Amino acid sequence: MMELNSLRQFLVVARLEHLSRAADELRVAQPSLSRAIARLESELGTPLFDRGGRLRLNRTGRLFRDHVERSLGELEAGQRAVAEATSQGLGTVRLASETFLTLTGPLAAYKRAHPSSEIELHWSPAEDMPRRLRGQDVDLCVASQRIHAEGLESARLFDEAVGVGTPLDHRFAGRTSVSIEDLAGQPLITARKGHWIRRLLDRLFAARDLTPRIVCESDEPAAIAGLISAGIGIGLVPAFARRVATHTEGAWIPVDSADCRRTVILYWGADNHLSAAARLMRTTITGWDWNADVDT
């Protein structure tokens, strides 16, 4: 009989594909975790990982992982539904996003309207969002890039221009627009691979058979803005971010390219049970007046 704890441990090992890191995250001894995975494989009668050198989830392991995520997600959803039905409060809403700067307005409005509700915020790259929604690890996801996966429903929140941020004394600062070709050879500050703004940068350059000259990669928007202001380089900056930034100085120049934009979308699982808190958060976010916040 498979134990729930062993299945949860398997999901962590499957995600990290590294026993020692998984053991650290789970706060268990590595030999104990290895034995738990071995027992699970013995019970299933087949290996779930390839162990030639680095640990890798194999085809059977990926198949099993998908079923385990759905099964544990349903179990946890049932537990939350019972807790919601027997409590007086709204419960907890779990929201994942690539950036929360965009969401500060609706999050503040939600908390003012529903002070008893708890909000859990999870940073997540877009590629992890379908798995987290299917496994009901989170209720809602906000992505700045389209997610192509089955079993998800979505609502488009807004579309906005992405321009170039520069120091005030940069030669581009006084221009009304720049082209992607103008950016070739310039020192660029951007996010790591997988982040929406890095995907956009790579896509724009690749479409013109150009290679960006990246001098810094960071997942911290404030650090990117600060480095641009300090004159270390320039970088793509969404219109929303340049208006709410108050602690750094710099110029923002539109890019002369129709595809230099981002579309922000809210996602949720099509068949997931959403708590009252999650349904209210969805209503708050989709009903927000984004036109008041966003330059198009």
Image (tube, grey):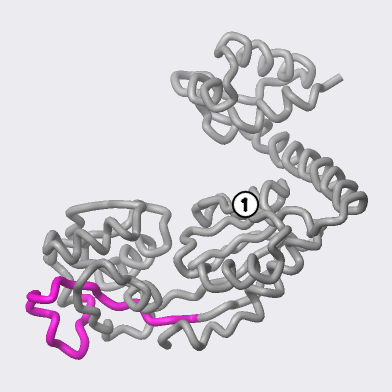
Percent coordinates x, y for residue 196 in the rendering: 42, 62
The answer to which image quadrant residue 170 occupies is bottom left
Classed neighbour count for the residue bearing mark 1: other residues with Cα under 10 Å, few (<14), some (14–19), many (≥20): few
Circle 1 residue: 120
Percent coordinates x, y for residue 108 in the rendering: 57, 68
Examine the rendered structure and indicate whether residue 29 appears above or below residue 132.
above
Q: Secondary structure at mark 1?
A: strand
The answer to whether residue 164 is magenta is yes
Residue at the image position 87 percent from the left and 55 percent from the top: 88
Percent coordinates x, y for residue 181 in the rendering: 18, 76
The answer to whether residue 173 is magenta is yes
Residue at the image position 73 percent from the left and 62 percent from the top: 278
Percent coordinates x, y for residue 47 in the rendering: 66, 21
- Indicate the amino acid at tag 1: Glu
The answer to which image quadrant residue 142 occupies is bottom right
Q: Quadrant of the N terminus?
A: top right
Residue at the image position 53 percent from the left and 80 percent from the top: 158
Q: Does any portion of residue 8 appear in the rendered image?
A: yes
Which is nearer the eye, 210 or 69?
69
Examine the rendered structure and indicate whether residue 68 appears above or below residue 164.
above
Q: Quadrant of the C terminus?
A: bottom left
Which is nearer the eye, 13 or 250?
250
Which is nearer the eye, 285 or 71?
285
Examine the rendered structure and indicate whether residue 295 appears above or below residue 244.
below
The residue segment tinted magenta is 159-180
The answer to which image quadrant residue 222 occupies is bottom left
Residue at the image position 48 percent from the left and 81 percent from the top: 159
